[in-house]
Image (cartoon, rainbow, N blue to C red):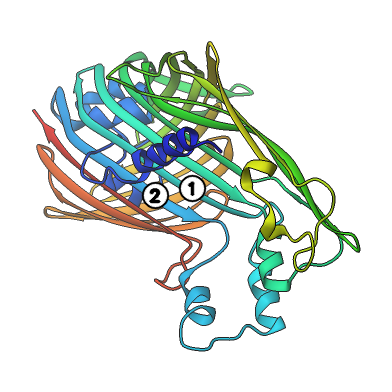
């Protein structure tokens, strides 16, 4: 990895996990409901969650709503929690027994330790009746460290062939979103085999289109290192190939476009049923300052760790070759996602359930809440490659509302979680 390549990747990581003082399209309420918010979202939040719900602006008794800021920050991993760290890596003269090592390694899945960070932010979102516009940014970093890289220091080297496939990806994109929702039917009945099933008071469709502004991206296309250990010694070889770019001198690194489609229907007994198709089209073309990075590792004939011909005598320039080349462009695409959601809001109580995919992975959420005077409380369980437990509190009413939410990945207590999520938003109704 060249110095330029390393510097760009670090800056992208900084972009993705630091901007806690900015804001997003998420909210404390949506986090508190475990993202079971597709059917419940109204007004300015519907721009992101379900543009069809913009047609239901009369539910809020005002035609204009505004979100001054919103933020969601998430960081976590797929393997370790705080309890394991306190059990094995705190205290003096801690010695890991074979049983301890087996337990630590059992926590790691076969694809290794995966660490991810996600930030969704928005600075201003406005919905006027059926129309909406928003300005937002999404940034994410995903890395994977092979399991064998932990087995070697914990169990030691043995005579075999080790294959490592590390991975690192990062992306930061700004969005200008335009959304519209329209009622297409009122007072309709759903029939199945000529039998009435559901009476709908209103049925709406919607769409949101996005102009994508590329701040930076990095992709690991291929990375493999083979280490062979036998009686002759140790030999390592491998190659690396990646692509990347980032904003420089105020010039965007790329541009693109996106499209989401949505459907919502309300019943007379206060249910909302929704279907949203996300990233029907989502293509980023990175075409400014794009480079490819090529690295080759080759230690040559087998060498011993100690004694004659030892590894410590090798110069890095002798075994590493790193090059970077200008390329015209490369493209990235967000995975197609869908959400099916049902919610009900009646008097002081609200509850919702939702299933589908998120970033190409299966998700499920079940949440509920209640309001008492100016206080709103929410809690939920959700699943997305792991178990999440979430809660939120909101303060205010129709015309002013601020909320805060917190979620944990993989565990409910401070010692058992594998990741943390924070979210907040500030909204007005006019």
Tell me residue 147's x, y (percent). 68, 58
Left or right of 387, for residue 238: right
- For residue 96, above or below residue 11: below
Mark 2 / mark 1, whichever is N-terminal: 2
Q: Quadrant of the N terminus?
A: top right
The image quadrant of residue 130 is: top left
Tell me residue 188's x, y (percent). 42, 19
- For residue 110, above or below residue 84: above
Q: Residue at x 91, y 64 (%)?
A: 231
- Which residue, given by chain and number where applicable, does mark 2 sit on? 74
| In contact (CB < 8 Å): disc 2 and disc 1 | yes
| Depth order, front residue of 183/296 | 296
Tell me residue 326's x, y (percent). 53, 16
Instruction: Look at discs 2 and 1 and give the one toward the viewer.
Output: 1
Please say whether residue 109 is visible from this viewpoint.
no
Q: Residue at x 69, y 45 (%)?
A: 165
Q: Which mark is residue 39?
A: none
Tell me residue 190's x, y (percent). 50, 23
Q: Which mark is residue 116?
A: 1
| Depth order, front residue of 27/162 | 162
Left or right of 194, for residue 110: right
Left or right of 208, for residue 355: right
Q: Residue furthest bottom?
A: 93
Query: Badge 1, how many Cα within 10 Å: few under 14, some, many 20+?
Result: many
| Depth order, front residue of 96/21 | 96
């Amino acid at each position: 990895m060249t110095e330029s390549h390393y510097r760009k990747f670090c800056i992208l990581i900084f972009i993705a996990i630091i901007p806690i003082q900015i804001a997003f399209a998420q909210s404390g309420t949506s986090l508190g409901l475990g993202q079971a918010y597709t059917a419940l979202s109204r007004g300015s939040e519907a721009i992101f969650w379900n543009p069809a719900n913009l047609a239901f602006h009369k539910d809020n008794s005002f035609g204009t709503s505004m979100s001054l800021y919103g933020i969601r920050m998430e960081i976590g991993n797929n393997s370790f929690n705080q309890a394991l760290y306190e059990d094995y890596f705190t205290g003096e003269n801690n010695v890991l027994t074979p049983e301890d090592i087996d337990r630590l390694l059992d926590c790691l899945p076969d694809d290794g330790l995966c660490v991810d960070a996600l930030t969704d932010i928005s600075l201003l979102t406005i919905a006027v009746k059926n129309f909406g516009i928003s300005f937002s940014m999404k940034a994410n970093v995903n890395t994977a460290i092979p399991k064998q890289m932990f087995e070697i220091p914990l169990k030691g080297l043995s005579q075999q062939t080790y294959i490592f496939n590390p991975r690192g990806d990062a992306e930061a994109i700004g969005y200008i979103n335009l959304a519209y929702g329209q009622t297409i039917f009122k007072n309709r009945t759903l029939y199945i085999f000529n039998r009435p099933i559901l009476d709908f008071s209103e049925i709406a469709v919607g769409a949101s289109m996005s102009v994508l502004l590329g701040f930076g991206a990095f992709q690991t296309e291929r990375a493999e290192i083979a280490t062979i250990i036998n009686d002759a010694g140790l030999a390592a070889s491998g190659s690396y190939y990646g692509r990347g770019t980032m904003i420089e001198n105020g010039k965007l690194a790329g541009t693109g476009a996106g499209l989401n489609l949505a459907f919502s229907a309300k019943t007379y007994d206060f249910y909302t049923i929704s279907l949203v198709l996300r990233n029907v089209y989502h293509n980023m073309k990175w075409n400014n300052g794009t480079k490819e990075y090529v690295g080759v590792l080759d230690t040559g004939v087998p060498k011993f760790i100690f004694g004659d011909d030892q590894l410590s005598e090798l110069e890095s320039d002798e075994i590493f070759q790193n090059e970077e080349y200008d390329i015209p462009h490369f493209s990235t695409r967000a995975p197609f996602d869908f959400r099916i959601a049902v919610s009900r809001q009646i008097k002081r109580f609200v509850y919702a359930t939702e299933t589908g995919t998120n970033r190409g992975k299966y998700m499920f959420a079940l949440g509920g809440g209640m309001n008492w005077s100016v206080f709103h409380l929410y809690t939920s369980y959700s699943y997305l490659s792991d178990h999440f437990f979430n809660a939120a509190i909101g303060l205010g009413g129709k015309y002013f509302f601020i909320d805060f939410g917190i979620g944990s990945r993989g565990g409910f207590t401070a010692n058992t979680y594998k990741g943390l999520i924070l979210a907040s938003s500030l909204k007005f109704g006019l």
